[in-house]
Image (cartoon, grey):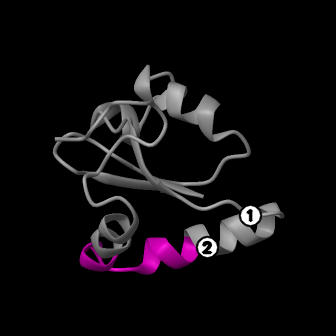
Amino acid sequence: MYIAASLSRVLYIGVTNNLERRAAQHRDKLIPGFTAKYSIKYIVYFEEFDYIDQAINREKQLKRWTRAKKIKIIEKFNANWDDLSVDDRTVE
């Protein structure tokens, strides 16, 4: 389960079994829709799970949260909004 963001900090919450591949898809705008439209391409938060149903449940939980609560969890673990999928990248 992951949270991705654009430079202007539009957020997207998703789930994948391969975060590295999904990050590249977002970065290269290979998936048409919301993330491509808003240039959401930086992984700013993620959690790993042993079972997909656990990841999906957590994704659904976070999607119900307020924006403020989502920002709080991102900043607790990634205060600088660094792109966690690529070394030396920061969302500014």
Q: Residue furthest right?
A: 51
Q: Is residue 13 magenta?
A: no
Residue 87, by quadrant, is top left
- The reply to whether dot 2 and dot 1 touch (C-beta < 8 Å) is yes
User: Residue at image x 62%, y 53%?
Assistant: 15
Chain part drawn in magenta: 60-69
Q: In the rendered image, which residue does mark 1 sit on?
A: 49
Q: Does 61 sit left or right of 69 as displayed?
A: right
Q: What secondary structure is marked by label 2? A: helix
Q: Amino acid at mark 1?
A: Phe
Q: Nearer the viewer, residue 81 or 61?
A: 81
The numbered disc on residue 58 is 2
Q: Residue 84 in the image: x percent, y percent?
A: 45, 43
Query: The N terminus lies in which quarter of the figure?
Result: bottom right
Q: Is residue 31 visible?
A: no
Q: Is residue 67 magenta?
A: yes
Q: Residue 26 in the image: x percent, y percent?
A: 46, 31
User: Residue at image x 75%, y 71%?
Assistant: 54
Q: Does 53 sit left or right of 39 as displayed?
A: right
On screen, residue 81 above or below 35: below
**Is the residue marked by circle 1 packed among few (<14), some (14-19), or many (20+) residues within 10 Å?**
few
